[in-house]
Image (cartoon, grey):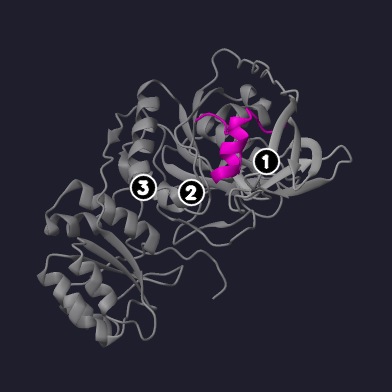
């Protein structure tokens, strides 16, 4: 997409500027209400009104001029357009492992827009390499952009494309894959890749940042360096998320993609394992294995299973919940629902008829807990047993985000409800534990 030469200007004012042959930064002479103004045209914030022209005066102050049809706009000079020629990237040493960086956007690939004050997705994968030139000392890195979006805009169609791109890179000889991704939905995407590319021969690591690259506290360089080294040299071959383990820059934790969740809005150690130990950590320039239960790097043929269903809902139970919320999804043709229930898996009995209707209409209903750690058990209380009697399926110790993604994936593999149930209760890529480990947390 080409850069907008009149950023933020709309309507009749934009037409007048276009007719005058004006670009942002050009020197203008503007006459309005019998007053003459000279200055350089400044960009506008897109959400502001469409009838004010902004000039930067020679004094350095900005002035806003209200547009009317009598306004006269004359271009009297062209601002010098800065040119930037990217320097060549340093070449990696011969024989180093090959790592592919696939950019999808997010804070790690963003900067502050000083016109709006907001964070915008702007950096290319090449820019990511420029941030950490030391990468060429640990891997032969190639990088490309698949998407350039914030993670809240990513859905199952993006997952399908991400899996295909990673699969192609692996088949082309990559020794490791890095996805740069926004942190807000990174857990969903990591779970999706876990199901969409199975029998992995190499690591697939999601890397993100809680602070944009132009902030002095940015964590992007450390996360990227650790991720590339780990993708190139780690002995495991799984999908995982790798961000800071604590508030310092000392170590990065790598957590299985189906057992990770973002648990803090802004801290560096936002990602925590759910009912599992981290697989490994990057520290002091090397990889330390933490969890002996991992799939090893090996000579294997990856399986691309990147189809996802659309009509799947993730619903959080709450007191006084109206059963018509569940009825809506059934009426709208949804094929599956994951209900985040309380504690061990209970919901208000007013929802039971909707759950029973879902079974009769061939809609899968899975039950997970709203609690972050632990597992559901619908046999403890009568309310749980009532759900089982009505066809609800307890999802063991999967947390809601992974269960939702897995159900979408299952719906992309088969239309048979019995087969969906069988797949949901089968541990495919480490998403289910037959016995939930004690993680040593308080309580």
What numbered label is drawn on residue 43?
Answer: 1
Please say if the residues under marks 1 and 2 sit with CB atoms less than 8 Å apart.
no
In-image side of 79 versus 441 (left or right): right
Q: Earlier in the sequence, mark 1 or mark 2?
A: 1
Residue 318 position (above or below residue 109): below
**Residue 293 seen in the figure:** no
Classify mark 2: residues with Cα within 10 Å, few (<14), some (14-19) or many (20+): some
**Residue 288 placement (x, y as % from top left):** 57, 42
In-image side of 355 versus 139 (left or right): left
Indicate whether residue 150 is drawn in magenta. no
Q: Dot 3 lies on which element?
A: helix
Q: CA distance from mark 1 to mark 2?
A: 27 Å
Question: Mark 2 = which residue?
Answer: 151
Q: Residue at x 71, y 28 (%)?
A: 75
Classify mark 3: residues with Cα within 10 Å, few (<14), some (14-19) or many (20+): many
Q: Earlier in the sequence, mark 1 or mark 3?
A: 1
Q: CA distance from mark 3 to mark 2?
A: 14 Å
Q: CA distance from mark 1 to mark 3?
A: 40 Å
Indicate whether residue 3 is drawn in magenta. yes
Classify mark 1: residues with Cα within 10 Å, few (<14), some (14-19) or many (20+): many
Mark 3 or mark 2, whichever is nearer to me: 2
**Residue 348 seen in the figure:** yes
**Residue 218 placement (x, y as % from top left):** 69, 45
Mark 1 or mark 3, whichever is nearer to me: 1
Q: Residue 167's quadrant in the figure?
A: top left
Question: Mark 3 = which residue?
Answer: 192
From which residue to which does the magenta span run? 1-25
Magenta segment main secondary structure: loop
């Amino acid at each position: 997409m080409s850069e907008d030469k009149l950023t933020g200007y709309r309507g009749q004012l934009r037409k007048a500027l276009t007719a005058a042959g004006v670009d942002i930064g050009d020197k203008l002479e503007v006459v309005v209400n019998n007053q003459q103004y000279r200055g350089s045209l400044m960009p506008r914030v897109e959400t502001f009104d469409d009838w004010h022209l902004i000039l930067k005066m020679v004094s350095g102050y900005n002035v806003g001029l209200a547009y009317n049809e009598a306004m006269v706009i004359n271009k009297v000079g062209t601002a010098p357009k800065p040119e930037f020629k990217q320097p060549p990237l340093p070449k990696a040493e011969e024989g180093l492992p090959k790592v592919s960086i696939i950019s999808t956007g997010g804070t790690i690939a963003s900067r502050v827009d000083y016109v709006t004050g907001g964070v915008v997705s702007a950096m290319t994968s090449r820019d990511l390499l420029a941030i950490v030139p030391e990468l060429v000392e640990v891997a032969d890195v190639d990088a490309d952009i698949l998407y350039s979006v914030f993670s809240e805009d990513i859905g199952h169609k993006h997952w399908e494309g991400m899996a295909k791109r990673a699969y192609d890179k692996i088949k082309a000889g990559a020794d490791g894959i890095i996805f740069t991704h926004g942190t807000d939905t990174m857990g969903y995407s990591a779970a999706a890749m876990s199901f969409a590319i199975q029998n992995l021969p190499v690591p697939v690591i999601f890397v993100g940042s809680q602070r944009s690259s132009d902030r002095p506290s940015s964590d992007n360089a450390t996360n990227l360096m650790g991720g590339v080294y780990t993708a190139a040299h780690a002995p495991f071959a799984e999908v995982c998320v790798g961000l800071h383990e604590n508030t310092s820059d000392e170590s990065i934790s790598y957590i299985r993609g189906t057992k990770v969740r973002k648990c803090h809005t802004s801290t560096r150690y936002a990602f925590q394992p759910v009912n599992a130990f981290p697989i490994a950590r990057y520290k002091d320039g090397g990889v330390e294995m933490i969890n002996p239960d991992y799939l090893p790097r090996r000579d294997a043929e990856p399986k691309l299973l990147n189809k996802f269903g659309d009509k799947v809902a993730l619903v959080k139970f709450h007191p006084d919940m109206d059963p018509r919320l569940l009825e809506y999804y059934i009426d709208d043709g949804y094929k599956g629902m994951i209900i985040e229930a309380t504690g061990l898996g209970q919901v208000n009995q007013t929802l039971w008829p909707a759950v029973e209707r879902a079974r009769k209409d061939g809609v899968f209903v899975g039950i997970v807990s709203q609690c972050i750690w632990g597992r559901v058990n619908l046999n403890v209380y009568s309310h749980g047993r009532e759900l089982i009697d009505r066809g609800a399926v307890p999802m063991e110790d999967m947390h809601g985000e992974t269960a939702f993604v897995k159900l979408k994936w299952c719906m992309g593999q088969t239309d048979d409800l019995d087969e969906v149930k069988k797949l949901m209760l089968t541990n495919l890529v480490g998403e289910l534990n037959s016995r939930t480990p004690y993680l040593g947390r308080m309580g």
